[in-house]
Image (spheres, rainbow, N blue to C red):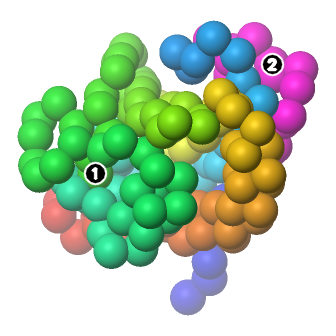
């Protein structure tokens, strides 16, 4: 079995306008985009739930709540994905939002045109974010391709 390539791009400034347009953050200090060409057809929300679940996993709790201090909603809800608030949606995309005392983040899941993608936006609200996120972003960039591939497999098995 061959592993399909997940394409990626990272920006710390000068975001392309189409990428910047889906974030609700007033400014963006870090952004990355990971995409997978796929024949799986599902809504962006279905992709987001396949990537992250309805509630955060223990590993996500460790990183999101404990290390980053993100304020996530407890329990399952139609207005959240893995505790992240659904802050917006449109044709082919859904935006998840969370914040802590030192940073704010958006994750946008897109699903259209034979491609599924995850775009992560981070805004540094206080100085500790500019130290913590660059370290964690390396782990984030290693994990996201597997998250997208696993989501594709989950959706395929549900069909």
| Callout 1–callout 2 Cβ contact below 8 Å | no
Count residues near mark 2 (Cα–Cα under 10 Å), then give few for <14, some for 14-19, many for 20+. few
Residue at x-position 16% and y-position 49%? 74
Label 2 sits on residue: 16
Q: Position of residue 131 (x, y in %)?
A: 79, 52
Say what secondary structure mark 2 lies in.
loop
Which residue does the image show at 45% across and 56% down from the upper left? 64
Select label 1 or label 2 by which is in front: 1
> In the visual, does 13 lie left or right of 114?
right
Structural crowding at the residue carrying mark 1, measured as other residues with C-alpha within 10 Å and reported as few (<14), some (14–19) or many (≥20): many
The residue lying toward the viewer, choosing from 99 and 48, is 99
Horizontal side of residue 79 vs 96, given as left or right: left
In the rendered view of the protein, which quadrant contains the C terminus?
Answer: bottom left
Q: Give residue 82's mark.
A: 1
Residue 78 against residue 92 in the figure, above or below: below
Q: Which of the two labelled residues, at mark 1 and mark 2, occupies the earlier sequence position?
A: 2
Write the residue at 75% across / 11% down: 17
- In this view, the residue in front, 23 or 46, is 23
Q: Residue at x 58, y 17 (%)?
A: 25
Mark 1 residue element:
loop
Residue 3: give x, y in percent of width and height.
62, 77
Q: Is residue 29 above or below residue 72?
A: above
Q: CA distance from mark 1 to mark 2?
A: 28 Å
Instruction: Inspect the magenta stretch and tell me whether residue 11 lies in it.
Output: yes
Is 59 within the magenta? Answer: no
Which quadrant would residue 70 be assigned to in this image? top left
């Amino acid at each position: 079995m061959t592993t399909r390539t997940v394409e990626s791009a990272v920006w710390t400034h000068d975001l392309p306008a189409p990428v910047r347009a889906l974030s609700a953050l007033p400014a963006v200090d870090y952004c990355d985009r990971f995409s997978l060409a796929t024949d799986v057809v599902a809504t962006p929300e279905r992709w987001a739930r396949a990537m992250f679940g309805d509630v955060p996993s223990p590993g996500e709790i460790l990183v999101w709540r404990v290390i980053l201090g993100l304020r996530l909603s407890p329990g399952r809800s139609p207005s959240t994905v893995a505790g992240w608030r659904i802050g917006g949606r449109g044709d082919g995309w859904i935006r998840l939002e969370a914040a802590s005392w030192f940073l704010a983040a958006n994750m946008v899941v897109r699903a259209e045109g034979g491609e599924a993608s995850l775009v992560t936006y981070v805004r540094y609200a206080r100085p500790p974010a500019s130290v913590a996120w660059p370290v964690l972003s390396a782990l984030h960039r290693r994990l996201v391709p597997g998250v997208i591939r696993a989501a594709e497999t989950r959706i395929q098995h549900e069909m």
